[in-house]
Image: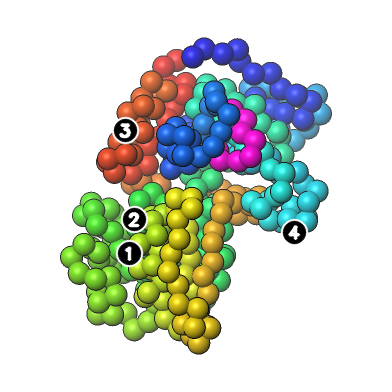
Amino acid sequence: MDRERPTPGEKDVIVKVGACGVCMTDYHLYHGTFPAEFPVVPGHESAGEVVASGDDVTNFETGDRVAIFPGIPCGECDFCTEGKQNLCENTVSMGGAGDEILDGAFAEYIRAPAQCLQDIGDLSYSEAAFAEPLACCINGVDRADVESGDTVVIVGAGPIGLLLLQAFRTSGAGQIVVSEPIERRREIALELGADHVVDPTERALGEQIDELVDRVDVAVEAVGLPTTIEDAHSITAPGGTTVVFGVPPQDETIELDPFDIYYHELEVVGVFALTHNTFSRAVTLLQGDRIETEALITDEFDLDGLQTAFDQMENNEGLKKMIYPNEAE
């Protein structure tokens, strides 16, 4: 539908969207499995050019190239003051999941608070659009508390799993094993630095992992299914950490042995979204050419192609879908 171009509030900017990635949160909003008040414009992995700003904005001006942090934390609750904006009790989302959702970046223009912008310099908009998912992955690496030389297994090699692979590699992980049933994704994982890849449909994951590494210090589930969470936890060595990164269905349960957790000092940690700190670090990594993004983009569309992107995601076709809202100009 056509809408009026947004105008900035005193502390806002208007960004002409150069690129916006499509992720599973958008997919869930589209299918109604994440609650939202409709109509709503999704899209929260975005970058673009500042074209207007409010009277109180002094740190950005027309023509600046920016990535957009898609949450608007309150800045006052305990979580915000501790730097955990992802857990803010009163956060508002721009185009993502949240208690209150403002229009996001599957549009030609988006209004955003100036505090949510990060300068991207000469990064292409498609590269900079990875700042948001990469920042989530950096949060996952932080939560895993990985140490240099740790052995990491990543279950799932979708766009997030492949970003996690690179984030763990830049953080000093030792051997990294990726489990993924789709052959092309396994090939890309090897190209991006995985030491080993396995097909979990061939044999039990645990059997294959035992043949490749001595122990698993960190097992990361990047799919979002109860069965794969249990699989990841089953291979975590004593003293190790299982990271629940993929978005599981609500109201699902998994089976964990509490004595096993106690006796083997196992940790199970969740990872939700990103913080201002991880977002800034993600932009820095992208600017330093530490993260490969081009290989992850398999499909590119203008706004009219968004339906096709969702259909492809439903069928597990390709990897990252990138939307260019102003491509028709």
User: Magenta segment: does it hold 84?
Assistant: no
Badge 1 element = strand
- Any mark on residue 82, and which? 4
| Viewport quadrant of the C terminus | top left
Q: Give the mark nearest the N terminus, 3 or 4.
A: 4
The residue under label 3 is 311
The residue under label 1 is 178
| Magenta segment boundaries in residue numbering | 96-103
Q: Give the mark nearest the N terminus, 3 or 1.
A: 1
Q: Amino acid at mark 1?
A: Val
| Residue drawn at x 54%, y 58% as measured from the top left | 271
Asked whether residue 85 is in view, the answer is yes
User: Magenta segment: does it hold 97?
Assistant: yes
Q: Which is closer to the viewer, label 3 or label 4?
A: 3
Q: Give the mark nearest the N terminus, 1 or 2.
A: 2
Residue nearest the observer in this picture, 174 or 246: 246
Point out residue 119 in the picture as x, y percentages from the top left corner. 62, 40
Point out residue 35 in the picture as x, y percentages from the top left corner. 54, 37
Verify CB contact (< 8 Å) between mark 1 and mark 2. Answer: yes
The residue under label 2 is 157
Q: State the CA–CA distance, disc 3 to disc 1.
A: 26 Å
Q: Which is closer to the viewer, label 3 or label 2?
A: 3
Q: Name the side, left or right, on which 208 lies relative to 1.
A: left
Q: Give the mark nearest the N terminus, 4 or 1.
A: 4
Badge 2 element = loop
Quarter of the image for residue 314 reads top left
Q: Amino acid at mark 3?
A: Asp
Structural crowding at the residue carrying mark 2, measured as other residues with C-alpha within 10 Å and reported as few (<14), some (14–19) or many (≥20)? many
Q: Amino acid at mark 2?
A: Ala
